[in-house]
Image (cartoon, grey):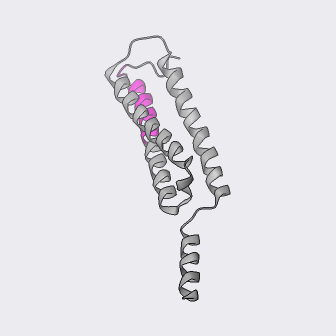
Amino acid sequence: MGKEAAESVTTEDLQRVDATFRNGSIMAIGVIVGFSLGFLSRWSALPGEWSHSDLVSVALITLGLALQVKALADLLLVSSLLLDRYNRSVRFFLAGLILVGLGVVLAVFADLLGFGGIVLKG
């Protein structure tokens, strides 16, 4: 019985993330969420008319930001020390980061190709 208890403890320890590692992830994700929010707020404050390509870009960026904020909120929970929950939060963050990146790239290329937009006029 002692051997089984020792095996379950080591298995449980392997399924947890070190709190220091998680704290570093929280810091990195928080900084990137701040940059994403800053980009969106600066872009939305630019004068000019919005085009359809702008609306698609804003939708992608907003959805990506929502996923990033959800990942940050999940990582702030104590339960995120469990490896499965930590990995799930990181996947949410990466999906959000990809969506924000796609929205920014779409806005820049739409403006460069002459589909209107206000992204490069600020």
Does residue 87 sit above or below 114 in this rendering?
Answer: below
**Is residue 33 one of those drawn in magenta?**
no
The quadrant in which residue 112 appears is top left
**Residue at the image position 50 percent from the left and 47 percent from the top:** 74
Name the residue at the front extreme. 1
Name the residue at the right extreme. 20
**Is residue 109 one of those drawn in magenta?**
yes
Q: Main secondary structure of the magenta part?
A: helix
Name the residue at the left extreme. 52
Q: Which residues are magenta?
A: 99-116
Does residue 107 sit above or below 72 in this rendering?
Answer: above
Where is residue 115? Give x, y as percent.
34, 22
The quadrant in which residue 20 appears is bottom right
Does residue 43 sit above or below 27 in this rendering?
Answer: above
**Residue at the image position 52 percent from the left and 56 percent from the top:** 86
Where is residue 27? Give x, y as percent.
64, 44
94 vs 20, nearest the viewer:
20
25 vs 101, nearest the viewer:
25
Q: Is residue 94 left or right of residue 30?
A: left
Which quadrant of the figure contains the N terminus?
bottom right
Q: Is residue 16 left or right of residue 97?
A: right
**Residue at the image position 64 percent from the left and 57 percent from the top:** 19
Where is residue 11? Give x, y as percent.
54, 75
